[in-house]
Image: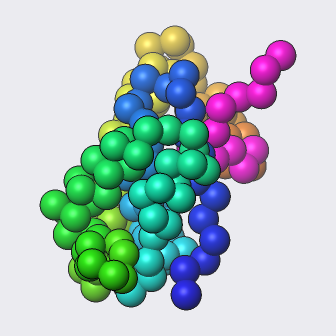
């Protein structure tokens, strides 16, 4: 049985909504919150939860199927494949490494030192922030 995943999208993000959905599913698989055989919410259900067009979710699910992360079976739904954990771990680690390299390069360009960068990273880890959660309105 799949652990309840809290899906969210940030409509202000430069990252396309379907990519945010794909990434969240891959993060959940990579972190073992979704396991092979677990089924995802229906397109209609997740589009309602997120308040997005069902076609957006269909695209995300189709892309994940092309990556062999999910398998769509008529009458069963969209299920996580046996290959998914290895695929998702590799893809998410590569993505996170790219993001971190870019962020560190920006820190260095700003003139920050190793201790300051380490403090920023430590505070970010401790904050418990989740990806694609919109910041509260001020």
Would residue 97 be seen by someone viewing this image from the given angle?
no
Residue sitting at the far right: 138
Q: Quadrant of residue 102?
A: top left
Whether residue 16 is visible, yes or no, is yes
Q: Residue shown at 46%/29% (left/top)?
A: 103
Predominant secondary structure, magenta span: loop
Eyeballing the image, is 51 above or below 65? above
Q: Residue at x 65, y 32 (%)?
A: 134
In this picture, residue 126 sits left or right of residue 112? right
Q: Is residue 134 magenta?
A: yes
Which image quadrant for residue 37?
bottom left
Depth check: give the residue in front, 24 or 119: 24
Q: Residue at x 20, y 69 (%)?
A: 68
- Total marks shown come to 0
Q: Which residues are magenta?
A: 127-138
Of 133 and 44, which appears nearest the observer? 44
The image shows residue 84 at horizontal and vertical percentages of: 30, 74
Q: Is residue 82 left or right of residue 121?
A: left
Q: Is residue 1 left or right of residue 82?
A: right
């Amino acid at each position: 049985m799949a652990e309840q995943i809290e899906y969210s999208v940030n409509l202000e993000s430069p990252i396309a909504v379907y990519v945010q959905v794909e990434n969240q599913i891959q993060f959940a698989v990579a972190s073992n919150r979704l396991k092979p055989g677990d089924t995802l919410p229906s397109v209609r259900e997740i589009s309602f939860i997120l308040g997005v067009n069902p076609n957006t979710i269909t695209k995300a699910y189709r892309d994940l199927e092309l990556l062999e992360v999910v398998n769509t079976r008529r009458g069963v739904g969209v299920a996580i494949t046996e290959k998914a954990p290895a695929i998702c771990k590799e893809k998410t680690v590569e993505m996170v490494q790219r993001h971190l390299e870019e962020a560190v390069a920006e820190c260095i360009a700003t003139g920050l030192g190793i201790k300051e960068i380490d403090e920023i990273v430590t505070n970010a880890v401790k904050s418990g922030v989740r990806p694609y959660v919109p910041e509260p309105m001020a």
